[in-house]
Amino acid sequence: MRTRGGVWRNWAGNQHCAPHAVERPTTEAELIAVVERAAAAGRGVKAVGAGHSFTAVACTDGHLVDLSGYDRVLAADPAAHRVTVEAGITLHRLNGELASRGLALENLGDIAYQSVAGAIATATHGTGIAFGGLATTVVGLRLVTGDGTVVDCSPDAERAVWTAARVGVGALGVVSRVTLQCVPAFNLHAVEEARPVDEVLDDLDALVDGNDHFEFFWIPGTRWALTKRNRRTSEPARPRRRWQAFRSDVVADNLAFGAMLRVGRHRPDWVPRIARRIPSAGRQDYVERSDRVFASPRLVRFLEMEYAVPREAFPSAFAAVRALERRIGVPVGFPVECRFTAGDDIPLSTASGRDTAYIAVHVGTGAPHDQYFTGVEAIMDEHDGRPHWGKLHYQRAATLAPRYPRWDDFQAVRARLDPAGRFANPYTDRVLGSC
């Protein structure tokens, strides 16, 4: 995320806006004052954390609230395994703070750059069929609403607000602080290896149900998938050697891969051959602190679309994506990521009401993506797919409302907390409807 010459851009560089003012509060009083000033002037307000969303969810021509300096740990209760933090703290920093207190988040996505508020607002998730996304661990929220009023919500107070605001898409107010239900710190036994993708598909249910956390990355144009199996363990840490981690996470996953994408822009027909020749780290078997296994560095910039489908629809949806990649005739090169989570009861969660499989497709920044992404979205439309709120998609409120059984519950809370549309922008108008 960066602001230069009065223009703000997101991490991927595909979204930008020219806000009236960029606000950088460091206290809740300052945050409330921003909203009150905007309300008095009739301007919009949008909060931004790390700017890692690929959509325009944080864009505004009003007051852009940069929460990067609003990132303290406010309270921790190791006995109850709970922590309260300011909204702008990044997951990376939070992981370290939790570890120092003997705590951890029970599940994480594969990057940790996002702010806590941004991650929960967009229904960010990891993988593990017995575990929900990050928003399911939220047991309390403090929210600044459209007129500057502060609302504290939890399962015991303002329950309807808490239920909806756990995935608020930035449309209910500015989150000030979050209380998270954590777990005692734990290690993960990780096994990472390449396997033929058809073999993975044949064994999919056993892999998903037989591991605490399972995901795989299929390399388009090849028959290979990188599988990642993680099991919770009380074993002591047995981390990779530093050179092994560097070779895998930096050389293979970032440097060599980035070089392949650059070559592929000029010679796309070379992509499958190059993909098969990227140095492999081979089978990796190690034990490490949980967050260090869940999250990996991402140095290559890209654009992403991710859809959530019912778990049982995954084989059909994934087969259609493979067929699309062959049909469009332009090698994609970027892996297709597949993950699996438990259902939840959050109105706008992508896993609301159903155990869920996620299919994420990517292209390098600057590469054409409309044909690929629109083709993938058409497939997901046929499988009751729900798009990740922070990743590219072409849906509208009219197409999304039937896919969320509790859509009207969210809209009722939105109408109550932001009747003037203080937190609306063109993106929320498109995907949620106008206030």
Image (cartoon, rainbow, N blue to C red):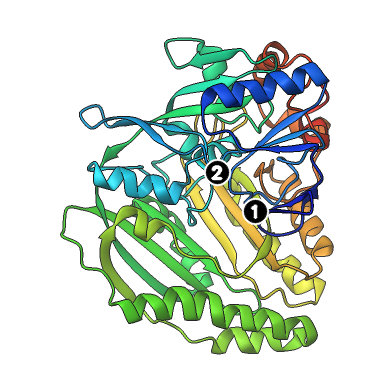
Image quadrant of residue 316?
bottom right
On the image, the x and y values in percent for residue 191 come to 33, 68
Q: Is residue 288 left or right of residue 350?
A: left
Tell me if label 1 and label 2 are in contact, CB under 8 Å: yes
Residue occupying image coordinates x 78% and y 71%: 367
Q: Is residue 130 left or right of residue 28?
A: left
On the image, the x and y values in percent for residue 126 come to 47, 49
Residue occupying image coordinates x 61% and y 55%: 359
Q: Earlier in the sequence, mark 1 or mark 2?
A: 1
Q: Is residue 28 left or right of residue 322?
A: left
* SS category of the residue bearing label 1: loop
Does residue 345 show up? no
Q: Please state the total of marks drawn on the protein image.
A: 2
Amino acid type of the residue tagged 2 in the rendering = Ser
Q: CA distance from mark 1 to mark 2?
A: 10 Å
Residue at which label 2 appears: 68
Which disc is residue 132 wearing? none
On the image, the x and y values in percent for residue 142 come to 51, 21
Above or below, 189 relative to 253: above
Amino acid type of the residue tagged 1 in the rendering = Met
Q: Quadrant of the C terminus?
A: top right
Label 2, residues with CA under 10 Å away: few <14, some 14-19, many ≥20 = some
Looking at the image, which is closer to me, 177 or 22? 22
Q: Is residue 206 left or right of residue 435?
A: left
Image quadrant of residue 103?
top left
Residue at which label 1 appears: 1
Residue occupying image coordinates x 65% and y 33%: 169
Image quadrant of residue 296?
bottom left
Looking at the image, which is closer to me, 34 or 296? 34
